[in-house]
Amino acid sequence: MNADDDARESHAHAPQADAPSTVAPSTTAPQAAGAKRRRLGIGGLVAVSVLAFGFSFALVPLYRIACEKVLGIRLERGAADGEAVASTSAPKQDRMVTVVFDAGVNSKLPWEFGPHEMSMRVRPGEMYETTYFARNKSDRDIVGSATPSVAPARASQYFNKTECFCFTAQTLAAGETRDLPVRFIVDPDLPDDVRTVTLSYTFFKNDVLTAELGAAKASSRTPQSAP
C-alpha cells in the first residue's frame, strides 16, 4: 500500500465534525416588546379619555363666562343659585319692583295653563311665592315640560327661582287640574332703572315621556296568560 492509499484510508476513518446546529430565534423579546407597546397604547387612550372628560366639564363654566362677560347674557339659574342669593342678600327696604306673571301653551299640548295672580309687588332680597295652574283638557294622560323666560333680558340674571315646576316634567292625568308653585327672589343688585320684571312660562308636550307613559299603561292593562 503506497502513501496515497494510506492517506485516503486515514481520511476515511477520521471522525467527522458535527454539523453546526440551527437554533430557532427566541420569541420572548418581541413578545415582551409588543406587550409593552400595548400597555403604553391603552394607557395613552385612558389618559386621553380622562382629559376629554375633564375638558367637557370645563366647557360649561367657560361657556357661561363667555355668555355673561362677552355677550351680556346670563344663563338660567337653578335652585342652588337662588338659595345662595337668598342667604347672602339683604333686602332693600326702600325699593319695590313689580313682577308680572305670563303663561303660554304650545299648540300640540291640549292643556289650559296660567297664573293665579297676574302681578305682584316685591321687595328685592326677599323670598316670595306664587302659583300657576295647569289643566289637562284631553282624555289621556300627558307629560308636559315648561320653559321659563324673564324680560327684560338684562334682568334675567337678577331673577332667581328656588322652587319651580319647570325644574322637572309634569304629568297630568286626563281631566286633572294641578297648582304649580314658584318660589323666587329678586336680587337686590337689579339695576335701579328696571322697575318691572316679567316671568313667562311656555308649556310644551313632552312627546318622549308621554309615549313612555302610554306604553307603560298599555302594558299594565295587557292580560297575563295563565301558567
Image (cartoon, rainbow, N blue to C red):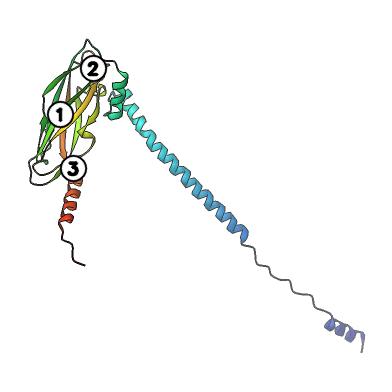
Tag 1: amino acid = Thr
Left or right of residue 87: residue 196: left
Q: Which mark is residue 140?
A: none
Name the element at disc 3: loop
Image location of residue 59, percent across then percent down: 37, 34
Q: Which residue is drawn at 23% across and 11% down?
A: 93
Q: How many labels does the image show?
A: 3
Name the element at disc 2: loop
Q: Which comes before the other along the chain, label 3 or label 1?
A: 1
Q: Whole-Å distance between the Cαs marked 3 and 1?
A: 22 Å
Image location of residue 111, percent across then percent down: 10, 38
Image location of residue 192, percent across then percent down: 23, 13
Tag 2: amino acid = Pro
Left or right of residue 23: residue 207: left
User: In the rendered view, would you say 226 is above or below 164?
Assistant: below
> Which residue is most to the top?
94
